[in-house]
Image: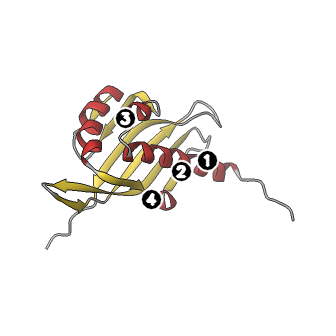
């Protein structure tokens, strides 16, 4: 039986999903120092707790420390991740649903959302660095 080689597009998508899965574990365990190494120092982000922030120090301080210690059960739905990439394979965008629980007093509540993550790398096969993240909660139906 002959094995087919993984296409460059498949390898790229697999590597992005792997990056997302590893980062998700760091979010779940509030491993902020380890997570910082995944990002460009010049990252630009916004999320559920802050307006636009510039740089990893501001992202860590304004978003991560405000949210990560206050949630539980965080997980990215890696299998549902949509990966878009540049023709040269040096930039990728991941659109990924996530779930967690938030706390209101003593009660925990479902806190689902979605994220967009922009990644870049210096060359094919080089490590990905996070350049932009946008986290938002799933909208509450109006009615």
Q: Is residue 82 left or right of residue 72?
A: right
Location of residue 13 in the rendering, given as x and y in whole percent from the top left corner: 58, 51
The secondary structure type at the circle numbered 4 is loop
Residue 68 vertical placement versus 1 (above, below) = above
**Foreground pick, 69 / 77:** 69
Which is more N-terminal, label 3 or label 2? 2
Which is more N-terminal, label 1 or label 3? 1
Which is more N-terminal, label 4 or label 2? 2
Which is more N-terminal, label 4 or label 1? 1
> Circle 3 is placed at which residue position?
32
Dividing the picture into quarters, in which one does residue 55 lie? top left
> Circle 4 is placed at which residue position?
77
Q: Is residue 114 left or right of residue 21?
A: left
Closer to us: mark 4 or mark 3? 3
> Circle 1 is placed at which residue position?
12
> Circle 2 is placed at which residue position?
17
Image point (44%, 46%), residue name: 25
Mark 2 in CB contact with mark 3 (< 8 angstroms)? no
Image point (43%, 54%), residue name: 95
Residue 91 vertical placement versus 100 (above, below) = above
Dividing the picture into quarters, in which one does residue 143 lie? bottom left
Which is more N-terminal, label 2 or label 1? 1
């Amino acid at each position: 039986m002959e094995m087919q080689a993984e296409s460059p597009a498949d390898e790229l998508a697999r590597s992005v999903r792997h990056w997302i899965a590893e980062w998700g574990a760091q979010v779940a365990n509030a491993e902020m120092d380890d997570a910082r190494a995944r990002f460009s120092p010049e990252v630009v982000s916004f999320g559920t707790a802050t307006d636009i922030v510039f740089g990893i120090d501001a992202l860590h301080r304004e978003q991560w420390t405000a949210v990560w210690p206050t949630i539980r059960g965080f997980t990215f739905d890696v299998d549902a991740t949509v990966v878009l990439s540049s023709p040269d394979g040096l930039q990728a965008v991941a659109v990924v649903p996530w779930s967690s629980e938030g706390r209101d007093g003593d009660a925990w509540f479902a806190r689902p959302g979605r994220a967009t993550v922009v990644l870049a790398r210096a060359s094919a096969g080089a490590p990905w660095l996070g350049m932009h993240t946008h986290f938002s909660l799933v909208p509450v139906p109006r009615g």
